Amino acid sequence: MTLHAFATITPKPAHFDDARAAICNIVQRTRDETGCLAFNLLENRDQGTLHLSENWADRPALDAHYAKDYTKEVFAQYEDWLAEPVAITFMQAVEVA
């Protein structure tokens, strides 16, 4: 069953553009990964947040994404840039008859 993930990223105000650029840098590579069905970056500048809407074939595909060097690099940069930890919600679609 498809795995949906929604991540809320809250950078420190001084690092909003840095965090945005870092994610933009990996969007296409992530979309090209096996098992990635959708990977979209959204922003709310009024609230100073970035959001990722992701769809994966399954949890192993997402885990493989987390293991990529470019993903690890973004997470390492987050250590200095974020005002709070990334909040990730995992969901599954509701099948409606």
Image (cartoon, rainbow, N blue to C red):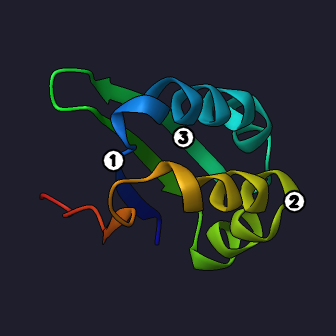
Look at mark 1 in the image and give the residue it sits on: 10
* Label 3 secondary element: strand
For badge 1, the amino acid type reads Thr
Q: Residues within 10 Å of mark 3 (few under 14, many from 20)?
A: some
Q: Which residue is mark 2?
A: 69
Q: Position of residue 92 (x, y in %)?
A: 30, 68
Q: Residue at x 49, y 52 (%)?
A: 55
| Label 3 or label 2, whichever comes before in sequence order | 3
- Residue 34's spot in the image, x, y percent? 79, 54
Q: Amino acid at mark 2?
A: Asp
Residue 87: quadrant of the picture: bottom left
Q: Residue at x 39, y 62 (%)?
A: 86
Q: Horizontally, is 72 left or right of 44 in the view?
A: right
- Percent position of residue 19, x then y: 54, 36
Residue 38 bears which disc, if any? 3
Helix, strand or loop under label 2: helix
Badge 2 density bin: few <14, some 14–19, many ≥20, Cα 10 Å: few
User: Residue 23 has which mark?
Assistant: none
Question: What residue is at 33 percent from the left and 62 percent from the top?
Answer: 84
